[in-house]
Structure formats: C-alpha cells, structure tokens
Amino acid sequence: MSLEIQGVRFEPIKGFIRYFVSEQGFVFDSKTQQQCKMYYSQANPPYVLLKEDRKPFYIGTKYFNFPSSTITKPIVVVEAFIDNPDNCKFVIYIYIDGDKQNNDVKNLMWVKDPKQRSRQLKAQQPKSQMVPIKFKQSCDNTSNTDIQNQIQ
C-alpha cells in the first residue's frame, strides 16, 4: 500500500504499519500526519525513532510499554525501494555526493561482497569526494569488526 503526498511517493516501512518512507529518505507518520524528526550524529548515519502501534498494558501489577525503535534512514530506504534479487546480506551506504544527510535511493545498494564493492567505489570516485562507507549486517552471524577487517 503506497501513499502519495504532494506528488511524492511513500512506501510503508516493514514492521511499522503507520510509517512511510520516500525515495529521498523522508519518513512520514500517518497517525500524526507529519514528517518524523531525524536525528544526526557524526559517527552514524541519520536515524529516526519509530513507535510501536500497540498500546501499553498491564498484566497483574506489571506495566508493559512498547518502546520506540531506532532505525537508520539508509536501511529504511533500501528495504522499501531497492529489490534484493541475489539475497545480498549487506547494505552499503554510499554517499556519492559527499553529503551524509543525503539518503536518496540513488546513493544506496545491496552488496554481496563489501570488500570488492569498496574497491570498485574507490576506483570510480575522485579522492576529494570520498566519504567513508558505512554498512550494516543484516542476515548472517558475521560481526561488524569482521566485516571492517575484510574491507580494509
């Protein structure tokens, strides 16, 4: 179920039925009818807090509240708009234009071998535009430090 707002197409975010994401990385909350606030840090890609759609409840005297989940924008965009035909296990955040806040669908892709793709990107880009590549493990048991060692 897609959503269109002012000519911009939004796709649902997997696991969060009230949230939608655009190809440019804007996250929209259909319950509040507003764009979600983005949070930024120097070391990590931008992220958004998404709340569960369930209401808090009591079992006996114990209170259960469903907290919000922190999800990075690149992961949300790539899962909504980019097919993964080869069952690749890694999402590579490629900031081609050097702007870490630009999480457009054109800057993201699924990659099977992060080491090989890292070399290809370095060969294609001038050094002045190089931005560190960030990645997220999504399917197997490989730790992030193991993957970082493979890339270097």
Image (tube, helix red, strand yellow):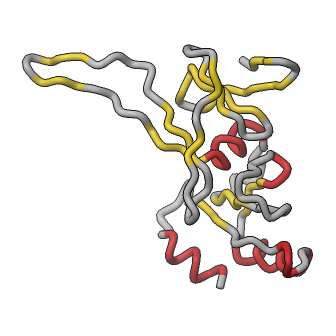
Image check: 54 left or right of 47? left
**Residue drawn where x is 81% and y is 54% of the image:** 107
**Residue drawn where x is 63% and y is 58% of the image:** 89
Which quadrant holds the N terminus? top right
Residue closest to the far left: 61
Image check: 8 left or right of 57? right
**Residue drawn where x is 75% and y is 33% of the image:** 22
- Give the vertical position of 121 relative to 46 (above or below): below
- Indicate the quadrant where residue 4 lies: top right
**Residue drawn where x is 58% and y is 52% of the image:** 40
- Give the vertical position of 36 relative to 94 (above or below): above
Relative depth, front residue between 36 and 118: 36
**Image coords of residue 23 (percent x, y):** 79, 37
- Give the vertical position of 40 relative to 38 (above or below): below
Which quadrant holds the C terminus? bottom right
- Indicate the quadrant where residue 94 lies: bottom right
**Image coords of residue 143 (percent x, y):** 48, 69
How many marks overall?
0
Relative depth, front residue between 50 and 14: 50
**Image coords of residue 118 (percent x, y):** 76, 75
Image check: 23 left or right of 67? right
**Image coords of residue 83 (percent x, y):** 78, 43
